[in-house]
Image (cartoon, rainbow, N blue to C red):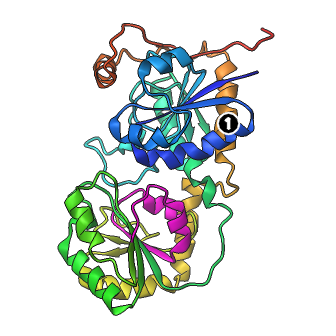
Amino acid sequence: MQYHFLIYISYSYALPIGMPLETEITKRGYTVKWFADIEDGKKAIQQKNNALQTIQEVLDYKPDIVLTATDSVADFITGLKVQVFHGFNAQKRPSKKNTFSHFRLRGFFDLYCTQGPSTTKGFKAQQKKHPYFEVVETGWSKVDPLFPIEKRESNNTIMIASTFTESLSLAYNDSVYQEIKRLSSAGTFNFIMVLHPKLPEAIVSKWKSINNEHFTFFNTTDLTPLYKQADIMFADTTSAIQEFLLQKKPVVTFKHTFNHDYLLHVQQAIDLEKTFQEALVYPENLIKNIENFIQDLHPYFDGKSSERVISASISFLHKDKSYLKQKPLNLVRKYKIRKRLNYFTFKSYNKAYTLKKNNE
């Protein structure tokens, strides 16, 4: 049976999430298109020859399965709405109800393809309270290219990554900037850096200005090649931490909001050098804590998460979903998505989308 897949994104950083899914869909001989609902994502997919430019083109395409790497999706287009996530649960800070936004329901999705036991447990708990969607654990497509893990000789390379929220981001901290500048000038370590695309240009330019023999700034959303180059990571609360940890490599964090035992924590820039040195030794107890953590986060090291996502989506597309309740009315969010797309309609798929097989 032939299927029409749509990869639905908002931001450019979702491109590496969709690419492994596109590869798997194409390998199976199905049709796949891309669509972005805001300008940043639209610019990112212009390089592709299978990008849909307008919401009307999406409606005309009539997708069977919509793989969504953003928090919301147009509810009025056809297709099973599948959440494939735009990041791991970074555990930056809990909400007022002491829950993480990773598990917040937006009322748009029929299927959540979860990344590992920790995510699955969170959404299974939500499903019991709001039984209008299904949960299948598949692993996360973005990290497929990370595997198999390649062994390499250490050259004291530190990857720097940061989040965009000013109160949480190391990129805004001048003492950190000055210390990294000093260490790179001294040649003590080799630094490779990438910053979140939402950070202001002034901040990005400041860090770019360090560029020297031992510091290289990369303007990219494809972080996997950088993960492989680095021996350790220096970060704040960015979800890139979790991606990097899958390699069983240490991460040094600056003013992280939680004292996780699988991270090395620094509160002042003056302590960075000695902590980097500690991390580069790969302390046995730390590595053991990392291994325990990633077994709960993403226990899939075969690079086949995209394969599982596509299989789960097709299977659920055809499944009898009469046991599921209708999605919530969700009027405010539905209005916002219509305003964003400048397309106003009363049409909405409030029940999980089902497609009968050809022989039924």
Q: Quadrant of residue 171?
A: bottom left
As drawn, 136 above or below 286:
above
> What residue is rendered at 29% in x and 51% in y?
198
Residue 92 placement (x, y as % from top left): 33, 55
The residue that mark 1 highlights is 25
Residue range corresponding to the magenta coloring: 217-245
**Which residue occupies 58% across, 67% down?**
247
**Image location (x, y in percent) of residue 39:** 34, 37
Between residues 144 and 216, which one lies in front from this camera angle? Answer: 216
Residue 315 percent coordinates (x, y): 70, 27
User: Nearest the camera: 51 or 73?
Assistant: 51
Residue 346 position, x and y percent, is: 37, 7
Kindly identify the amino acid type of the residue bearing the numbered disc 1: Ile
Q: Taking the image as drawn, is residue 138 in sight? A: no
Nearer the observer, 141 or 200:
200
**Residue 179 shown left or right of residue 17 in the figure:** left
Q: State yes or no: residue 300 in magenta.
A: no
Is 203 situated left or right of 308 in this image?
left
